[in-house]
């Protein structure tokens, strides 16, 4: 509910009521139970980091020299600790004079000064070092003799991994300027943070690349990306240069990979209301990336699995991630959480703003569907524990989708323009600084005059979600709804205070909205029956604006009215889902009407599934299914396949071959169809697989390629030798990790564990890509569990191989010893 809908009296009543919530106990519980509620202590304020870096990539070696300029915060200290795990320190200098008294520890280096510190006094230290990091800095493809892998070097600093390649104070609660110099082969591109101030040829054939950050940013945001790229430049409406990196052999996929890139940038600048805070913005894809993407200051790194063609665009496009990482340039990079307890101020904001752009690009229904998925995952997470979003151990579900839903509620409550004004103030007052959740609350109070402590206590510092049970009462002259709050759990706010919209649908199809405030465990609201008669359907929290679990039993007539007439897509969808177990005389006609009327794929798909559950030989149902299967909406195509899977209809199976003629049918859609046919119709499956062969060599067809050979092995005995050899080949080092994972999974399903694949899986265990290492481990453990791999054979394979110098570590990861 927007505050403007309440009117002045209602607005003052709402704020006055909510401000009285006693929540100190909730705050104290949250604070005292969070081990990361406060930032790490330090007695030096680091201000500038100057670094010079050279690489020996075939050895995975970095040779660095870093100078720290800092100011003592406190007096009386003669030592300084820098994070530097497994870094070899060669020398430490102060004003070009060696400091010989330093101690190397497992986690870093302790440097001793000849005199005590004086608060406010400036200092500098220069450290020469070498490192062969397993975290923070990644050397990709340099030892691959097959030539299959790209050769790259890239960094990933979040949370505290930059310390593995730069000796530094590596915590988010300090901000530094940087000046970084990189020497590398002149045939490669080198990207880092900020402005490129020098690119200079060197006598040895290398280039010097020098990047400067003139505004302070957090140490974990320092980055480098090195590889062979084609660079396209765009410019935002505000004049910011945008540099888009792509592999030279994938330039034909530029438009599908960077879809709407400039539009995203322009939208976020306007929507946030605060100018982009850095001199330029670059985006660079890398191979073997361990996450989705990372918002390094002015230079985002993302996994090259987001380089997509037309088909793969429907499976995994970069639009949401692009908007998410760009939003981080404000929320995370410009303003940075003071400690891990407040990390939601970064991830929730970035998620919320990528939702807002997705609404522009894909529509309101898509935005609402994002919120519905956030609601489902948040409620599921709430069954495990009741941690609030302002907690370091809240987990990704709360830091990302739940926190984004909380911001949706805040924006819905205050109104979009008021929300934007408060956000601008928050950014202005805290630019290039560290922030807490209280800083955001203060900005809303100071800019809008609102006392929103109740909202923070309930949704930020308090845990859990409201569980609402709704009961309707109809009498001769009045009707009423009773709402009970049922939520329980330690740390859960009870009761919640909830402003709700109640939508009434009357027998003549007209609608009306009533506003209520639920502020106790049991609330009852009563109204006189109007001239329109009793409401046929009552929808509490119309549009699902509140993050809650709602339980409201309704008649089949009420559900049908809701599915047909509710204002919001989510309510119509819920009404339709409610009809699954109801038998209506006119259900078929109702479902067909809904299918034709609705535009969003989830609603159309639900109608289709229910229609197929009553399958006979009705030509109208077959026509709707074929329309869905061959529509322009890839999500709806998937829904048609799901409907067929849930209610197998043999008469429809031959029509799956029509997917082969759709030029943008996604790879996952084709793979799903192939797997379905392989289970139910061997002849059609082989025919379908034959039609897929022209697609198998495409870069985005990794999983489809493995599935094809898996199906060939299972269905065509004459192809078994070729099929399993192809799958084993796809597991070898050099192929990018998604191809290898798909091949491991296909071999495991076929119960095939040949020695060469075992060796490739052992190698995968050592990968710095956790998804690949886990995939290799899963493959081997599956074989051990099934008795198709013998422990002693695996030990012998590891012992004899030169690829695994640390045999003990390797085997311990498999056998827990």
Image: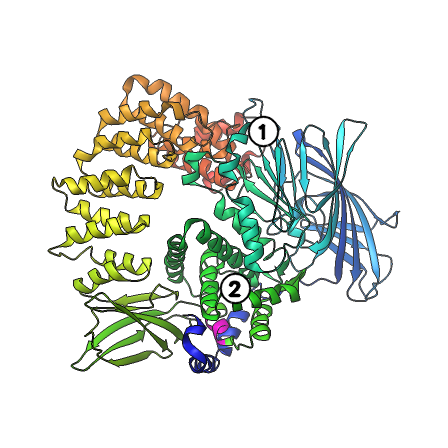
Residue 689: x and y, percent? 31, 25
Kindly identify which numbered label has been placed on residue 143. none
From what the image shows, is residue 159 above or below residue 748?
below
Q: Is 551 positioned to the left or the right of 367 in the image?
A: left
Kindly identify which numbered label has been placed on residue 391. 2
Q: Which coloring applies here?
A: rainbow
Q: Residue furthest top?
A: 718
Label 1 crowd bin: few (<14), some (14–19), many (20+), radius 10 Å: few
Q: Which residues are magenta?
A: 454-458
Q: Is 644 positioned to the left or the right of 229 in the image?
A: left
Mark 2 vs mark 1, foreground winner is: 1
The image quarter containing residue 223 is: top right
Q: Which residue is mark 1?
A: 248
From what the image shows, is residue 783 above or below residue 17?
above
Mark 1 or mark 2, which is nearer the start of the sequence?
1
Disc 2 versus disc 1: distance between alpha carbons?
43 Å
From what the image shows, is residue 736 above or below residue 642?
above
Query: Which residue is drawn at the image coordinates 68% and 36% (left, top)?
Result: 190
Q: Is 744 positioned to the left or the right of 560 in the image?
A: right
């Amino acid at each position: 509910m927007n505050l403007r809908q309440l009117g002045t009296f209602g607005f003052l009543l709402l704020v006055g009521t909510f401000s009285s919530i006693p929540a100190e106990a909730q705050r104290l519980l949250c604070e005292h139970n969070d081990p990361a509620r406060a930032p790490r202590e330090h007695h030096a304020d680091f201000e500038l980091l100057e670094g010079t870096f050279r690489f020996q990539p075939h050895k995975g070696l970095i040779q660095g020299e870093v100078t720290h300029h800092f100011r003592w915060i406190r007096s009386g200290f003669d030592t300084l600790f820098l994070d530097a795990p497994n870094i070899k320190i060669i020398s430490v200098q102060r004003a070009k004079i060696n400091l010989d008294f330093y101690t190397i520890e497992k986690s870093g280096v302790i440097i001793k000064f000849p005199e005590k510190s004086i608060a406010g006094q400036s200092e500098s230290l220069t450290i020469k070092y070498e490192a062969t990091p397993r975290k923070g800095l990644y050397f990709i493809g340099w030892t691959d003799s097959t030539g299959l892998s790209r050769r790259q070097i890239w960094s990933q600093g979040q949370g505290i991994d930059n310390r593995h390649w730069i000796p530094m104070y590596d915590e988010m609660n300090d901000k530094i300027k940087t000046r970084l110099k990189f020497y590398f082969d002149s045939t490669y591109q080198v990207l880092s943070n900020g402005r490129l101030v020098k690119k200079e040829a060197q006598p040895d054939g290398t280039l010097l690349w020098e990047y400067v950050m003139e505004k302070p940013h957090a140490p974990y945001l320092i980055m480098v990306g090195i590889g062979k790229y084609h660079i396209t430049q765009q410019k935002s409406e505000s004049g910011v240069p945008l540099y888009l990196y792509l592999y030279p052999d994938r330039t034909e996929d530029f438009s599908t990979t960077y879809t709407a890139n400039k539009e995203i940038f322009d939208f976020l600048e306007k929507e946030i209301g605060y100018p982009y805070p850095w001199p330029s913005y670059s985006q660079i894809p890398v191979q073997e990336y361990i996450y989705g993407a990372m918002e390094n200051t002015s230079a985002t790194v993302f996994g090259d699995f987001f380089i997509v063609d037309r088909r793969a665009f429907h499976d995994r496009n970069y639009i949401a991630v692009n908007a998410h990482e760009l939003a981080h340039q404000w929320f995370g990079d410009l303003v940075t959480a003071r400690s891990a307890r407040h990390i939601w101020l970064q991830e929730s904001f970035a998620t919320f703003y990528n939702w807002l752009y997705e609404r522009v690009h894909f529509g309101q229904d898509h935005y609402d569907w994002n919120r519905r998925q956030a609601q489902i995952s948040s409620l599921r997470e709430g069954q495990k524990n009741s941690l609030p979003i302002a907690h370091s151990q809240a987990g990704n579900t709360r830091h990302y989708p739940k926190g984004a839903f909380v911001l949706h509620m805040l924006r819905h409550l205050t109104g979009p323009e008021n929300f934007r004004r408060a956000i601008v103030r928050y950014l202005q007052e805290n630019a290039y600084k560290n922030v807490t959740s209280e800083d955001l609350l203060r900005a809303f109070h100071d800019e809008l005059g609102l006392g929103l402590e109740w909202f923070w206590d309930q949704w930020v510092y308090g845990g859990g979600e409201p569980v609402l049970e709704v009961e309707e009462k109809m009498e001769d002259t009045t009707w009423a709804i009773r709402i009970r709050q049922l939520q329980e759990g330690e740390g859960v706010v009870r009761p919640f205070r909830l402003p709700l919209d109640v939508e009434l649908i009357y027998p003549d199809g007209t609608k009306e909205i009533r506003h209520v405030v639920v502020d106790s465990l049991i609330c009852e609201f009563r109204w006189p029956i109007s001239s329109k008669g009793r409401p046929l359907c009552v929808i509490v929290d119309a549009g699902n604006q509140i993050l809650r679990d709602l339980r409201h039993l309704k008649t089949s007539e009420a559900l049908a009215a809701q599915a047909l007439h509710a204002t919001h897509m989510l309510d119509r969808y819920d009404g339709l889902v409610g009809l699954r177990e109801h038998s209506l005389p006119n259900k078929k006609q109702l479902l067909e009407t809904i299918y034709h009327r609705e535009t969003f794929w989830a609603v159309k798909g639900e109608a289709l599934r229910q229609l197929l559950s009553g399958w006979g030989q009705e030509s109208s149902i077959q026509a709707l299914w074929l329309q869905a299967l061959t529509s322009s909406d890839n999500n709806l195509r998937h829904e048609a396949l799901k409907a067929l899977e849930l209610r197998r209809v043999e008469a429809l199976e031959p029509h799956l071959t029509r997917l082969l003629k759709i030029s943008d049918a996604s790879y996952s859609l084709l793979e799903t169809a192939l797997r379905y046919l392989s289970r139910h119709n061997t002849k059609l499956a082989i025919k379908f697989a034959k039609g897929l062969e022209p697609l198998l060599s495409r870069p985005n067809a990794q999983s489809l390629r493995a599935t094809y050979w898996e199906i060939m092995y299972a269905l065509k005995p004459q192809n078994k030798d070729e099929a399993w050899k192809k799958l084993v080949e796809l597991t070898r080092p050099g192929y990018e990790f998604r191809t290898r994972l798909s091949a491991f999974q296909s071999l495991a399903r076929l119960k095939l564990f040949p020695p060469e694949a075992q060796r490739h899986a052992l190698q995968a265990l050592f990968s710095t890509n956790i998804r690949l290492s886990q995939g290799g481990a899963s493959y081997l453990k599956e074989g051990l569990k099934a008795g198709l791999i013998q422990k002693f054979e695996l030990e012998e394979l590891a012992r004899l191989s030169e690829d695994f110098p640390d045999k003990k570590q390797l085997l311990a990861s498999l056998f827990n010893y």
